[in-house]
Image (tube, rainbow, N blue to C red):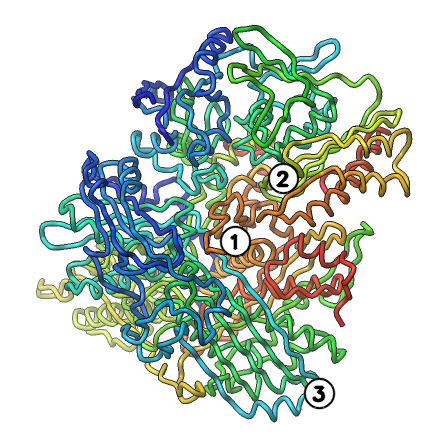
Amino acid sequence: MTNFDYLKPVSLKEACVLRAEHAGVSQLLLGGTDLIVEMDQGLLSPDFLIDLREIGDLRGIRVEKDDIVIGAAVTFTELIKSKTITDQCQALIEASKLVASVGVRNVATLAGNICHAVPSAEGAAPLLVRDAELTAVSTKGERRISIHDFFTGPRKTALKAEEIVTAIHIPRNSLKSGENYQKLGRYRGEDLAQVGVAVAVDEKYRYKIAYAAVGPVPLRITKAEEILQGGPPGEKSLPAAVEAVKKAVSPITDIRASKEYRLYMCGIMLEKAVNTAVQRMKGNKAGGQA
Amino acid sequence: MKADRKKEITFTLNGNEVSVLVSPDEKLLDVLRDTLGMTSPKYGCGKGECGACTVLMNGKTVRSCIMLAVQADQCEIVTLEGFQKNGITDIQETFLKHNAFQCGFCAPGFILSTDELLRENPEPDEEEIRDALAGNLCRCTGYKNIIEAVEEMVENRKKGAKR
Amino acid sequence: MKKLNVVGHDAVRIDLKEKITGTAKYTDDLAFGPNLLHMSVLSSPHAHAEILGIDTSEAEKIPGVRAVATGKDFPQKMGLYLKDKSILPVDRVRYIGEQVAAVIATSKKIADQACKKIKVEYKVLPSIHDQMEAVREDAFLIHPDLGSYEIVPWLNPKPGTNISHIRKIRKGDIEKGFEEADLVLEEEFVVPHVVHAALEPHITVALYDYNDRYTFWNSTQSPHTQRHILADALDIPHQNVRVIASSVGGGFGGKAGISMEALGVACRKVPGYPVKLKWSREEEFYNTSQRQALRARLKMGVTKDGKITAMRHVLYWDVGGSAEYGNNVVNATGFSATGPYYIPNVSIDSMGIYTNNPPCAAYRGFGYSEFHFGLESLLDRLAKQIGMDPVELRRVNAIKAGDPVAYGVPMNPSGMRECIDRVAEAIEWGREETSEDPDKVIAKGFAGAWKAPAMPANAGSSVFIKFSEDASINVELSGMEIGQGLHTTMAKIAAEELGLPLSKVRVELPDTDRSPYEWQTVASHETWELGNTVILAAREARERIFDVVHRARFLDKEFLYLEDEKVKSQLDPTFELPLKDFVITGIETEHHTWVGGPITGSASYIPEFTNAMVDPETGQGGHPNVHYTVGAGAVKIELDKKTGVVRVLQMAEAFDAGKAINPDLARDQIVGGFVQGLGTALYEEVHFDKDGKILNPNFTDYKIPTTLDVPYKMDPILVEVPQPDGPYGARGISEHTMIPVMPAVANAVANAVGLRIRDIPLTAEKIALRLNSQDFKPED
């Protein structure tokens, strides 16, 4: 790890000033579970580390009229313990429980996970199927970024160098809905996702389907959504949706999994996720992982 | 490139207030072990994947090998040394009774993770026990005695045995 | 049979309290004061290259750097069975990650920075990463000087090739044997490299003092052998090398022999300063040792009644860049690759082949897990094709006491049939189960297993026992506690022999200056050999006790015995002399003089019937192994036909321990070994790129089992058919428990869906893609 200066602002305003001053040569620190590892490996070498943990504005989960708002400092453990998230964001809860291990979840944040923006980011697909938005602030002001515009490449986001994400907004469901998150790992223990899929469906059978780890960025598969739209998954529609997914994604072969297996599993996991989400939407308890 | 600028951090370690001067890039694990003499958290992998470095930070388990020491400023840190300072705990005694560990390298991490589990969820079922301890790797035991010991701890605490 | 008070009874292991209180000191926990220096090692980026020159001048200039060492400073070669390994290489590197230079500095950070400033000029050579390429006649030679290396006389390298050793068995008439068979199958099996992944990485702290002495503090299974290898390599007196053993955070064979600890000798450049070298997890993957990779060609014939008539087993071992230890894996498996079965006609060729992969040495099972994969898989195939139950096939062929093994020596007493039967019963073999989930299949798989300790014919142990005033004892020995419970085993034996409770026995970690010689803690031979030695030492102490009592009290020695920490007499039930009254001070006579003095006992032991000098062409004419331990294992799996995921729901394993000194800890070895085996069966594999670089030197991508991955029901079963020359009848089992796992799982997969996989590991990807491919045909 190279030398860096450690800064700990006590207010969001101060944090924005520091971030602007050191735009491009600073990294933001909350949990640090990805950041510290990458700095050790030499993948990141910031001159400044800006620790945001003193900033109260970033904490807490609250329910507003239209949105559930998750502060940038909210950890995966806090998400898992939150009744709001458990009741209203099923895919996010399932994905959160699969992040690493308890000791990592206790400090790692959803915001950090999203901003790290690796193609397999656990929080990505659940947020994509909820059309989430992020609030990014800087000395110049505040703006909302749609999750659909957020991921621009492997480990690249739409954030400007001087911006800080302060919150993630998840629009509340007005209709009865069901969600499921499926993760492909090499075994049941802690693993990075080789395929991740989130499916959300409402009582009008409007589907939202998002995949992670099978392309340079996490993405929604609108073609598959259109095929399934309007009714429960059928003998023809589900395989057709699977085909649409396979055409839309571009998985790689690496030591974790081959392209063939990932493509194959995209289909298997879609079936499971769609069926589970539909069951849950109907109010039936349906199982978790494949 | 800025020069190495040390920071003074102050935190409670095992109930005692300590102040140390650390370099921003120093890991909490290394400061605990090399500067403060707490050798129970161990280096196993350096990436937070094996749990041997687990300590309690404000009551929660964290992987000290991927935390910077500066992140511990103003926190309460407990290592196994402090965890048992009022006497060996029921968690340790039950692990002892079940011959739960072999080489012992993973034991401090397991003990603290078990403590957190039982505080958060006093009556976990076997699946919940496995899930809570999945971040602590053990190469020797196959986990059978560890899990059975935790199940006994749950039963004993239900009956009102000592903590 | 005398009633046993301690041996054979469960107890809390004697080293556990210190481990659960954080009291146990592993090498990195030791405090060495402000003079501690730190070493970093520059490693080779090339798998095979000549070193043309090393320029350390820039590194030496960095403030805080105290010394730099290269092969010029330590050109010696070293090794356990053959000296093909360098402390620091002089002219050639043979694998990516091999040490090239070492820097000693005031901080690890400075040492790391200085390493980056060392300039090495390499001439890259062709590198070979597949043993089948390396074994070819025209292959580039990895050890062109093989013929000039010092080597033990019982190994057969082939200079002028990449073959580091070949062990052959020719027994009976192989052609006739195949002719007698009603069914002959020939198949090939592949097992990749895996690593030990002990939680504690390798570490050494070394100090060279002004008294010309090296002191090492190591995490090791072999303190005396490390001392010997270094003293021998450096050509210095043994008394000038001292190895002090700390608690070990897991060994599994990876801390046997010597690897990175040898670099500690560079501390000679900074006399008076202790120097610490500790491996990162990444370095642990690259530069310690790995388990050999194997390609096995196996041909077996059976009659329609299931009797095996002949076996031809050719084992191609990738031993990596150094075979100094791994050659014995080649050797041991060459003798034993029949498995626990009587086979009248046997032809085995076991070949160690150098490659430019990391060196492979000792790993739990010592080659046996690897060859049993193919053997036990093929046995299932043979059984199915002749319409016989696979477990019955094992029963029919199970080796019995007196049957000649592959090298002609009669098999020792053992309970193979009992192990088979008890495992079959525990797993409910024959009872089919179906899953409620239509996508899942439940099936069972079975495998037999055996192993003999793989050690030189003269591997020795010694023990020294001394009493304290309160009649407690210290049992001084150099057998290492690496988690397997060895110290508890030895303490129980000493307690039993001397009539003491376990709580009055202390067994501690050795110091080669203070502790009597032990070859190594490997081979699952310690319970047997060191146990016998403890008995002899205890009996000597007991003899001395009886002698003192006889001389002071005129009692007949023949009728004295020890019980409850007292000397008693069979002739006089009222006679009771507490040990604590005299084991230090002696006994006062009627004249107020004293007889006796501090009671001690010592003993040493080597097997005196073993002979490793067999005929190199046939393997016959010697007695290379002391005895075999047999066993069997089975799993019940649930296989998801869509995802390929295999979940092991239940396991049962039985091993014939002869006499379990610690029944509870022995069962724990079965569970632990099973789980370590499970990882190798399902997902563990070292991935290399085509140039020999390890792609997964971390736990991110080298997965070992977690609490979520182990079966819910695990049945460890101990069988006890006494080993006639074992302590209380005991023999070892700790390595063995890994051996049946890979084939048991592979057989279960085949039983589930007819998919036969012959290349380990049995990943979900392999199962899903092969099962669901167009070309899939269930095996016949």
Residue A159, compared with residue C292, is above or below; it is above
Residue A2, compared with residue C152, is above or below; it is above
Distance between the Cα atoms at labels 1 and 2?
Answer: 19 Å
Residue A193, label in figure: 2
Q: Of A246 and B29, which appears nearest the observer?
A: A246
Q: Disc 3 marks which amino acid?
A: Asp
- Residue B20 shows up from this direction: no
What SS does tag 2 mark?
A: loop
Residue C197, compared with residue B76, is above or below; it is below
In the image, what residue occupies the spot 46% across and 69% down?
Answer: C134
Residue C687, label in figure: 1
Distance between the Cα atoms at labels 3 and 1?
Answer: 41 Å
Q: Residues within 10 Å of mark 1 (few under 14, many from 20)?
A: some
Q: Quick check: marks 1 and 2 in contact, CB under 8 Å?
A: no
Q: Residues within 10 Å of mark 2 (few under 14, many from 20)?
A: many
Residue C308, compared with residue C333, is above or below; it is below
What SS does tag 3 mark?
A: loop
User: Is C503 left, or right, of C314 in this rendering?
Assistant: left
Instruction: Say which chain tag 2 marks.
Output: A
Tag count in the figure?
A: 3
Q: Which residue is mark 3?
A: C182
User: Is C205 left, or right, of C682 in this rendering?
Assistant: left
Nearest to the eye among marks 2 and 3: give it: 2
In the image, what residue occupies the spot 40% across and 89% down?
Answer: C621
- Whole-percent x and y of residue A100? 57, 36
Q: Disc 2 marks which amino acid?
A: Ala
